[in-house]
Image: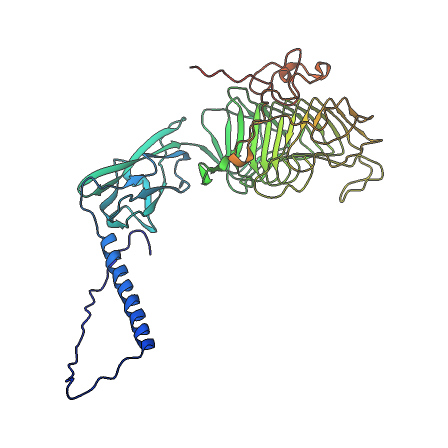
Amino acid sequence: MDGFSRHIYPKNVIKCSITRYNVASRRIPPIPHTIMTRISTIIFIMAAAVSAILSGCIEDGFTSSPSDLPSFSVDTLKMGTVITEEGTATYRFTVRNRHSKGLNISSITIGGENAGMFRMNVDGMSGQGFSNVEIRAKDSIYIFVEATLPSNGQDIPEEVRASIDFITNGVAQEVVLSAFGQDVTRYKAHIMTEDTDWNASRPYRITDSLVVAENATLTLRPGTVIYFHDKSSLIVHGTLISHGTPSQPVVLTGDRQGNVVGQISFDLMSNQWEGVTFTPSSTGNTLEGTIIKNTTSGVFLNHSDMSMTNCVLRNSGGNAMNSIHSDLTAVGCEFAEAAKSVLRLEGGRASISHCTLANYYLFSGIRDASLSLAHITPDETEDGTDPSEPLLSATIDNTIIFGNGSTISHGDLTGTQVYLRRCLLKNRGTDDDNFINCVWDSNPLYYTEREKYIFDYRLKENSPAIGAADPSMTPGGPGSTDRYGLPRGAAPDLGAYVYMPPEEESN
């Protein structure tokens, strides 16, 4: 029975008839003991049932006291930043009756000058207003809220407020509704055929695809945000240049906002858009301070080239980064959370320095090693791989590879051109010609707590990665600081992030 149904109990009347016997004229035979026992049992059960019915009627009586009011799980329902002219995700809060009698909420309405922008569903029924909503004693109901905010003509988000107003026993209460409407620049199945600059003035929203044609360059200035709708993608035949900074990163992400369920936000969800593909005609690609997340297939570098500094690639339903017979340089980057590998290298050339490879993927088992290597030995065959392609040549320096699942797909790199130098590894092992001066079987002590949905790969105090890097392999230029702008210094730390002591709590 739902939370606001009216409970009506029939007023049954039990009538008893008494037959009189003339004792003198008719002898009543004695009732056997077993029958008497059964009768007593029946009477007891009937009495208990009547008592339960009467008790239920008393419990479900409705209070009319002005001091008996509902309570709410939130004072303000915060719906975050939403794209204007489109429906939001569904948000909810709870209305509780903590009293020993039922509550009759005489009115629930959406109020305020922006009321028409919001919609609600009260315990399963949609509408703008409801009357005589009943909540049984010690029970509760849900109220679900959605909104569609109109364009506001602003580059920055603009807050829109309304309220859900309650009147109970003559007393008014409210829950405030708050959402920030963000205007976006929209593109659908758009092909860029000439050099184009995008900036941080307002976000861009892509449906279907954004294609950078051959010989064209798309440049993303600091703070640029691009939202991708379901199944949309970025395909680069030309060149992509992204100039994010510590204070203004460039962000490529899905367009869903808020929480998908409970405390799991859409920010943690993979498979929200396809990802970024660099085709064989693409050259000269540079990404700095760029975050690419929530994809199905991550970043796919196909017979192309890429230089990455202080970037984050995370939350992919496939590989976070997949480089096939390409030229990849990555410094200070985080590759994290993928159903397959966070970094897959097949053939080509790769230089990986001061990176963090960590996989604590939430939504399925992890199918591949954090670092997956392919086409690295002459006798290795890969489906669809041209055997004439050069074998993988890779150096992986001052890097952390630690997380759930296996670490490296090839435990034995003997005879290959793949070298891990001064890396912290989850595995137990010993150095050889390919594993050089590594830190084996050590926990880097991330701040990550998977069970609490915290994915922070900076280092805690006492991490064995602190000060453990080889400074001779620490690059200069933009890679000499991490993505938060912290300098690596003369005694650099392993991984993408420079250790920062926690701030002392003030008394």
**Residue at the location (32% across, 76% down)?**
33
Locate residue 451, reporting x and y percent: 53, 36
Q: Which of 465 and 176 is in front in this view?
A: 465
Locate residue 332, reporting x and y percent: 63, 22
Task: Work out whether 375 lies above or below 482.
Answer: below
Q: Say left or right for 66 vs 424.
A: left
Q: Nearer the viewer, residue 397 or 386?
A: 397
Q: Nearer the viewer, residue 6 or 312?
A: 6
**Could you say which quadrant of the image residue 302 lies in?**
top right
Query: Can residue 60 be seen in this snapshot?
Result: no
**Residue at the location (17% across, 42% down)?**
170
Q: Say left or right for 294 vs 283.
A: left
**Could you say which quadrant of the image residue 416 lies in?**
top right
Q: Which of 193 and 247 is in front in this view?
A: 247
- The quadrant of the picture occupied by the N terminus is bottom left
**Residue at the location (28% across, 59% down)?**
52
**Could you say which quadrant of the image residue 31 lies in?**
bottom left
Q: Say left or right for 83 vs 347.
A: left
Query: Can residue 437 be seen in this snapshot?
Result: yes
Task: Work out whether 130 lies above or below 197.
Answer: below
Q: Which residue lies furthest to the bottom in this view?
A: 25
- The quadrant of the picture occupied by the C terminus is top left
Locate residue 195, reporting x and y percent: 57, 26
